[in-house]
Image (cartoon, grey):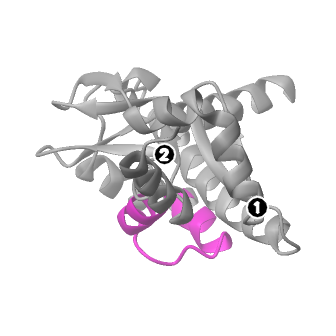
Amino acid sequence: MADFIHSKAIFEQLMNGQVINRHVLENNSELNSNPLFDEIIQFEDEYRRQYRMSGYQLEVNENYILLQNTGIEADSLKTDASMKVYVLLLLIAKYLNTRNYKTSKIEPMGSGLTHSDISLMEELPDIRETLDKADMKKSLLSHIKSTLVERNIMLEKVGSDAYVLSDAGNAFFQEIFAYFYDNV
């Protein structure tokens, strides 16, 4: 039977549009197993049934779990939220490439994307233009925090003002690379 405390925490995260990653970042460099992820995997059928009865579909992937709305408005909401995530990850990849950084910079053991990196990104003319076309007018830092960090796609390294990819963020990042390699 599912654990009540974990179930409540899972519900709050999923209903707030957050993903649940296989791992959590501790001590800014240590990846540990996420008890919420483990809880869902252990009682997957129970959790799938619970969310299906409420009009949602629990998407269980190898390294992360997210909730999809199965209602009529699901396609437009999914597209808008997903588009912003992919635009930001694509811009981060472009920045890393422009500065000749390896992707390991934004992996959990890397130094992370710092506030100064984000300021430098925002100064690049094509990045600002892309953000404007994607109707993302606020500062790049605020978009990274609200779209990537608050949804657990990127994780903040405590005390260093740096951001690294979570399990879900890495999967989405790899999906972008696979798309471009397949379509080049």
Q: Main secondary structure of the magenta part?
A: helix
Tell me residue 23's x, y (percent).
40, 28
Alpha carbon separation for disc pair 2 and 1? 26 Å
Report the span colored magenta. 127-147
Tag on residue 153? 2
Tell me residue 179's x, y (percent).
79, 32
Question: Which amino acid, by three-letter code, is at mark 1?
Answer: Met
Tag on residue 109? none
Question: On the rendered structure, is 179 left or right of 83?
Answer: right
Question: Which amino acid, by three-letter code, is at mark 2?
Answer: Ile
Tell me residue 131's x, y (percent).
57, 66
| Residue 97 visible in image | no
Residue 122, by quadrant, is bottom left
Residue 80, by quadrant, is bottom right
Question: Residue at (62%, 54%) from the top-left corner?
Answer: 87
**Label 2: how many residues lie within 10 Å, few (<14), some (14-19) or many (20+)?**
many
- Is 176 rendered above or below residue 87? above
| Residue 46 visible in image | yes
Q: Nearer the viewer, mark 2 or mark 1?
A: 1
Which is more toward the observer, 45 or 111? 45
Question: Residue at (55%, 53%) from the top-left corner?
Answer: 88
**Residue 19 magenta:** no
Q: Label 1, on which residue?
A: 53
